[in-house]
Amino acid sequence: MIQLYPASKRYTVKNDWLESNLSFSFGEYYDPSNIRFGPLRVFNDDTVQPGRGFGIHPHREAEIVSIVLKGQLKHEDNLGNAGIIGTGSIQRISAGTGVLHSEFNASKQEEVQFLQLWFSPDEKKLTPSYEDISYDLEQMHNQLLPVISHTGSERVAKIHQDLTLYLSRLDGKETLTFRQEEGRRIYVFTIEGEISINNDNILKSRDAARITDLPEITIQASQDSFFLLIDLPGGEF
Amino acid sequence: MLMIRHSIGSRLLCQSETYTIDEKEDHWLISLPIDEETASKVLEFQDELNLFVTKEKEKTWFYSSDAQIKFLPKENQLMILADHKTVYPV
């Protein structure tokens, strides 16, 4: 089954420094029918104004992934990590038993856009950890490039959950096929452009699809497109 | 001020100016007055609660990793046995 979630149906939080489009219940937005998709708990599409950001705050028991789409994000945490990541970089925080961090727009001129995803970890009470990686933009051209996985590897961040997150830039009219084991889930989010899944399920910019019981899908771009695909475990969460 | 928030997005579930915190070895027994309806809302998310004591320049973060929380209906009291405490500046 393919369920489409148009960008316009997302919940929007907007103030003088932040616009956040929420795909799942988060903060003030609480919809008991929209809590998670498997281990995926949070999918926030954030834009932060220059010099502004999220001050120091804690998290626990979550695998937190930030994907910078535009601009630069400045990270600091109580594990001793500090740095700036930009387009082509991904940050993974395993909050485990507790981490304090802040995330600010590193630029005084340009806004920063990033996706923040939270997953339930496959194990509780993990030691908190941090990792950031840069991926090769060329390697996702007309193919699926893994950037986060359970095992991790060079230029693939390791996450404590049985999932793989792929990025792809697909030229207009190009097609990709994705296969997974039966019983798993697929989440697709279009970052830019327009794609179709199995011909008649159209995803425009910032639309999403939650897919179950369909271990093989075909993705076609109707124009040059940039999208994200997550291979997620099945079962109860 | 003591605030009880959901750990996903920090939604405020309950706050109280009145509370006690008793330190017991490496645990903290936190109790606060609460009505039954609010207690029910808090207990619904008992596995995903963060507690914050806020002062002018610092916050103290508590949580109970094994969701040790109970409501005493006769006393209208919520009791939480926290096993984690972190103080940080704000």
Image (cartoon, coloured by chain):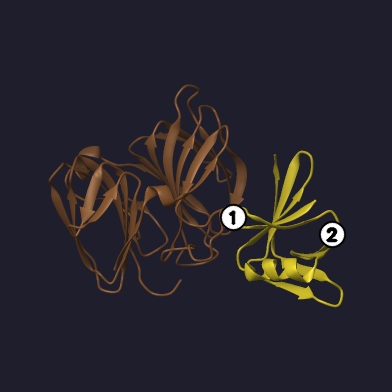
Chain colours: A brown, B yellow
Q: Give the percent coordinates (x, y) of residue A1.
A: 29, 68
Label 1 residue SS: loop
Label annotation for residue A53? none
From where the camera sits, is residue A151 visible?
no
Residue B58's spot in the image, x, y percent?
Answer: 74, 42
Task: Identify the residue at the far bottom of this view.
Answer: B74
Residue position marked by numbered label 2 in the rendering: B19
Q: Which chain carries label 1?
A: A
Q: Residue at x 25, y 73 (%)?
A: A182
Q: Do the residues labelled 1 and 2 touch (CB within 8 Å)?
A: no
Numbered disc total? 2
Residue type, numbered disc 2: Tyr
What residue is shown with label 1? A98
Q: In front here: B7 or A61?
A: B7
Residue A192 is at least partly visible in this image: yes
What's under tag 1, amino acid-wise? Gly
Image-based side of B7 in relation to A93, left or right: right
CA gap between label 1 and label 2 equals: 24 Å
Spot occupied by residue A214 in the image (x, y as percentages of width and height): 24, 69
Work out whether A173 lies above or below A186.
Answer: above
At x 79% / y 39%, what residue is drawn? B56
Mark 2, chain letter?
B
Residue A186 against residue B66 in the figure, above or below? above
